[in-house]
Amino acid sequence: MNPLAQQLNDTISKENNHVYDMLSGLGKQIFFPKVGILSQSAEAKQKAKKFNATIGTALENGQPMHLKVIQDTLSAYNPKDIYEYAPPAGKPELRTAWRSKMLEENPSLTSNGLGNPIVTNALTHGLSIVADLFADVGDAVLIPDKNWENYELTFGIRRGAEIVNYPLYNSERKFNSAALRDALLAQTGKSKAIVVLNFPNNPTGYTPGPEEGKEIVAVIKEAAEAGINVVAVADDAYFGLFFENSLQESLAGQLANLHPRVLSIKIDGATKEEFVWGFRVGFITYAGQSESMLAALEQKTMGIIRATISSGPHPSQTFVLHALNAPEFKAQKQEKFEIMKGRANKVKDILDNKEFDAVWEYYPFNSGYFMCLKLKTVDAETLRVHLLNNYGIGTIALGETDLRVAFSCIEEENLEELFSLIYQGVQDIQKVTAQ
């Protein structure tokens, strides 16, 4: 094993041996080179005042070389803020700004024991880093039965982990903490369990209430007290889009400092929060650990980044930083929030029409981009194809009964027509079936 990796492992083991035991085989081996091109270039950037011939970029007239046809469209920005490589951990000013934003929006997170966010190439990349660092073949990854399909690829296919599903809702149509408890305690005797908490949930748009949140935290603490090492991952892709009296902050804060056997990790990003999907700017943040532990985990995370994408795109990091620092940022974001909230409320008003009761019910939703219909009389895939071919309407079929509708991309004035046509599609299929 490389001495640098061993040094990081020794630090992690010394600070919290349970976290060391959570690391995958790759997680134990990975490190960020201190003696290499990037580290030598960083040193030269500080000291090479005459000539710096280290890094693979081109300079001209003291600025990064660039094409006028590109710079003309980006003239508001200094070339050094868009053309140079961003550091592997991300633009330092952006990391600082995002950390401040997290602390403001998540009162349960405290600056004590909170790592500096590390920039990822959006949220999938952050989840992939978690999988690389902590998931080995056969490790259990707990996600609800209503989930984002990419978890299977990220943790299951890529890393060989075992996906363990539990029902998202209980009989009271709230988060099924008891099912999570059963699934988690079933891992007793194994080295670890990875729990992914995605709120607002994709595909249902559900976020638990405060009491449900406390139940989730209590379940994870109970599992830790039973001897299970828990990697608790808050997938906060749709953070902030809370339209009702649900949790208004990430569970990462309540999970930090919960128990020595619990590692709280927050995955979030500008992607959905700031409506910049194509920018691909996300963050991974470790919480509730000592400074030495946070530094070691950051080095291992940077090692994964260096070994995969080297560093994230610089221009989009600069754009996000500019937005966060703009005086108009909060007001403009609130304006978009109100639009999204209006669409969600409109969908509920439409679906509460008793006319629809015979053909579907809808899963509870109160946040995010999506909602899900539970079809009673037709197959979801059959309906999806029928709507697409006959009405030009795109939806997502999930299993036999569930149809996901993204109200985020439908103007409020068009929502009633959308669901009327979905209803008409159900009736079409029923008529054919009855013949």
Image (tube, rainbow, N blue to C red):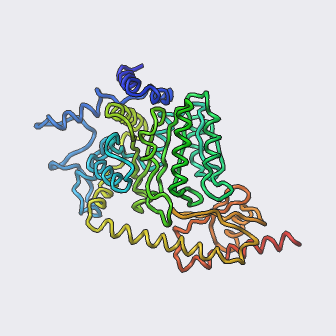
Q: Is residue 310 visible?
A: yes
Quarter of the image for the C terminus: give it.
Answer: bottom right
The foreground one among 357 and 314 is 357
In the picture shown, does residue 220 fall above or below 424? above
Q: Residue at x 20, y 46 (%)?
A: 59
Q: Residue at x 30, y 52 (%)?
A: 100
Q: Position of residue 142 (x, y in %)?
A: 59, 42
Q: Residue at x 33, y 55 (%)?
A: 104
Q: Position of residue 358 (x, y in %)?
A: 76, 72
Q: Position of residue 74 (x, y in %)?
A: 28, 61
Task: From the viewer's perspective, tell me whether residue 86 is left or right of residue 16.
Answer: left
In the picture shown, does residue 127 fall above or below 15? below
Q: Count how many numbered circles sit on residues in the image.
A: 0
Q: Position of residue 299 (x, y in %)?
A: 35, 33
- The quadrant in which residue 399 appears is bottom right
Task: From the viewer's perspective, tell me whether residue 316 is left or right of residue 164.
Answer: left
In the picture shown, does residue 338 fall above or below 274? below
Quarter of the image for the N terminus: give it.
Answer: top left
Q: Is residue 154 visible?
A: no
Residue farthest to the left, as pictured: 50
Q: Residue at x 52, y 73 (%)?
A: 343
- The quadrant in which residue 388 appears is bottom right
- The quadrant in which residue 2 appears is top left
Task: From the viewer's perspective, tell me whether residue 221 is left or right of residue 282.
Answer: right
Task: From the viewer's perspective, tell me whether residue 20 is left or right of residue 429.
Answer: left
